[in-house]
Image (tube, rainbow, N blue to C red):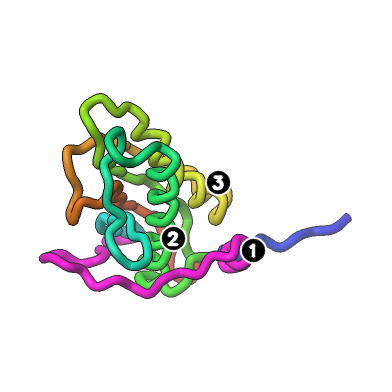
Amino acid sequence: MSSSAPVSVYDTLKTLGLELPPLAVPVAAYVPFVRTGNLLFISGHIAKKDGKPWVGQLGRDTDTATGKAAARAIAIDLMGTLHAAVGDLNKVKRIVKLMSLVNSTGDFTEQHLVTNGCSELLAEVFGPSVGAHARSAFGVAQNPMGACVEIDMIVELADEGQA
């Protein structure tokens, strides 16, 4: 009988060919994250492409597949901030909740499918027991800098001394 050690989050990132970005400097009056107890609140991250805001409005000039790719890019940025905040992604006990703001027309109704880009990657990286989360996906008239998607995240961390 063989026993297998849990797979490190970093091994999964490497297998997926993903590299976490450094902590981004806020462009307004807020901090990138706040920890209270074992909860970490990560401020909203806008979609970026080639280092610039990924602009567009779903239902007007951006389709669902492109929005989903933008949300996936945000997941990578969120994990970069999470790593900067805690130093080790293996300390994540649970991704608790995402809130997704999708820049969309009044008749666009696929915000949930756009947000899947972020949700699916988090579940893949952290595994279903840690990465599956509650979430909200809203259509909004605009996001900062015209970004097509903005997502924030709440994370539960393991007790100190546990990983």
Q: Residue placed farthest to the front in the image? A: 61
Residue 83's label in the rendered image is: none
What mark, if any, has residue 76 been given in the picture? Answer: 2
- What percent of the width, then of the height, locates residue 90? 52, 65
Q: Residue shown at 45%/40% (left/top)?
A: 65
* Spot occupied by residue 73 in the image (x, y as percentages of width and height): 42, 56
Using residue 163 as the reference point, say whether residue 8 is left or right of it: right
Q: Amino acid at mark 2?
A: Ile
**Foreground: disc 3 or disc 1:** 1
Q: Amino acid at mark 3?
A: Ser
Give the Cα distance between marks 2 and 1. Answer: 14 Å
Range of residues picked out in magenta: 10-37
Q: Residue at the location (36% across, 30% down)?
A: 110
User: Which of 12/19 is in front?
Assistant: 19
Q: Mark 1: which secondary structure?
A: helix
> Residue 45 location, x and y as percent?
29, 57
Amino acid under disc 1? Thr
Q: Which mark is residue 15?
A: 1
Q: Secondary structure at mark 3?
A: helix
Instruction: Give the number of the disc on residue 129.
Output: 3
Q: Main secondary structure of the magenta part?
A: loop
Question: As rendered, which of 67 and 2 lies closer to the eye?
Answer: 67
Q: Earlier in the sequence, mark 3 or mark 1?
A: 1
Residue 5, image x and y in percent? 71, 63
Q: Is residue 22 magenta?
A: yes
